[in-house]
Amino acid sequence: MVEGSQKRPKERVTSCLHEQFRKHAEMNPGAIAVVHGEDSVTYGELHSSSRFLATRLRELGVGPDVVVGLHVERSVAMVAGMLGILEAGGAYLPLRTDDPVERVSTILREAGVDVVLTSATTDGRLAAFGGTRVRADAASVVPESDATGPQERPTPENLAYVIYTSGTTGTPKGVAVPHRAAARIVRSGIYGDFDAEQTFLQACPLSFDASVLEVWGALANGGRLVLLPDQRVSAEAVIDAVRRHRVTTLWLTPTLFNQIVDDGLLTGTGLRQVVIGGEVVSTPHLAKAMHTTDIRFSNGYGPTEAGVFTCCKVFEEADLAYSPPPVGPPLPGTRVWILDEQLQPVPDGELGELYIGGDALAHGYHRRPDLTEKAFLPSPFEDDAEARVYRSGDLARALPGGLIQILGRLDSQVKIRGNRVELAEVESALLEAPEVLQAAVVDRQEGAERVLVAYLVPAEGTSPTITDLRHRLAKSLPEYMIPSKLYSLDRLPTNGNGKTDRNALRAGVPAEELPLGVAFVPAVSELEKIIGEIWSGILKAPSIGIDDNYFDLGGTSLSIKQAQKQLQERLGIRLPSTALYEYPTVRYLAQAIKNSEV
């Protein structure tokens, strides 16, 4: 078990997110709170708008643990809507405005929502919604008397928000997060400075829980929040907003971070701190960024079910010795365990599943006690009968000094020819090659066989080859874990949240296959020509040299059977199943056949 004990003693969250905002609004009402394009609003103005919305929502029965939909594009009204819902005592449910109406309707139905905040832009899209729609962009100034009257106030244990993520059953599931879990990540100075001197950029969708850091890192600490224009997030758009508005603090997915580093966009931005999270961090990109800028780079690791961030740290030079770099120890009040399938702790350095406990935990899945029971388990390590642990599904190991290294997802586990394969392990092995900056491995159905396919972003100035990479992988991985195909991309595709789009990779994106890396030597003998023709047809390779390796060309155990059958039909030769493993090139196989060695 590892418990957060970094720099400060454990402290319980005693106030809610909106109460932290309200404190700054009352202390410094004239300070700029939110900037959107050419428009800006002060803390005092934003507080007044949110109180107006809160009054209306309370009239509609909103109070503690009542979930209210927020279907507003990125705007000042969106932020006022969040605050208004919380000020009323409720919990906000962010809805993506670019999602299909059917998906939005499904989420609202699953969440049991009766009230939704909308805007002039989005109101018409929910015409079929049977509940009440309230315009967040129609908020007025609350009179000095404030007609809200006495009302039940939420506590840190009440819900702050519900975020819906994709579910394994095909139906989205909502993670119900209390103020206690969310507020803790913006009160810690462990991985960033959160104060009135900071300007945060809000760039990711509210339905992506990193938005909690972006929004409340600023507003709960008296800082300034800059809203990225409501457009598809790109490296160029993010850095343009950073420069234009003098943003000091930025959160990025590793995929977007890698693109920004590759394009050399961090230099001279004025950024003070960048928090990276959501995926495994690329050590080469982190090293380049650390060595070419004076920005402080931090890690923010954690699932939505554990209050956004679980383990955090400022990256140091020593962290670059690991690929991927460690995510740090858990935050104060948070505990983690790395366990095997029997829920027993694994020795330091060995792989296991990360389990999380303490203040970070969500209440569970909203209105889904069945899912909650499967993922949030009674803690086997604590005396408190109500203590729970969340099984993250993340593959992890403990490093020296209490650090945690995350290597990928357990649900990226696939079966290749009956063997269990962790895709994260293959990716980690690829990233050990100096020619590889980024790597994503997916499984794909090829005929009757499931194969591994790797997509790589080569390091600048390098030209990795299939032969070299497969030879390197063969030193650390069994044969069945070596990808059958290796492709090169300028950039890995991303989804709406800025993460690597593995579904797109599985479907097949336009990409160039890596060069084989072997000089082409044409067939000379008739036997070599026949073998080459058979391989060419099976492997769909236009031309095969006699020194080309069958497996480097994409050959698999199933395709070997096809090669055996066709050789028998054309030459009357019945090869053993091990022949191509022993003689994997046309030259070697022809010689073996000629010399009666097979």
Image (spheres, grey):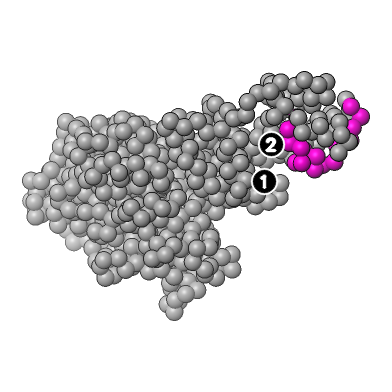
Up-down: is 131 above or below 236?
Answer: below
Q: In this view, does 346 lie to the left or right of 231?
A: right
The front one of 525 and 418 is: 525
Q: Which amino acid does label 1 sit on?
A: Glu
Q: How far apart are marks 2 and 1 (CA)?
A: 10 Å
**Residue that badge 1 annotates:** 479
Q: Please tell me in which quadrant of the rendered image residue 552 appears.
A: top right
Please report whichever mark, 2 or 1, sits nearer to the chain's N-terminal start.
1
The quarter of the rendered structure image containing the N terminus is bottom left
Query: At 40% from the left edge and 55% from the top edge, which residue is drawn?
Result: 326
Q: Is mark 2 on a helix, strand or loop?
A: loop
Residue 370: give x, y in percent of width and height. 53, 60
Chief secondary structure of the magenta portion: loop
Of all residues shown, which one is farthest toward the front?
A: 595
The front one of 445 and 258 is: 258
**Residue that badge 2 annotates:** 551
Using the rendered image of the protein, determine whether residue 384 is visible from the camera's viewpoint: yes
Q: Give the range drawn in magenta.
A: 571-586
Q: Please tell me in which quadrant of the rendered image residue 486 appears.
A: top right
Query: At 75% from the left edge and 41% from the top edge, which residue is drawn?
Result: 581
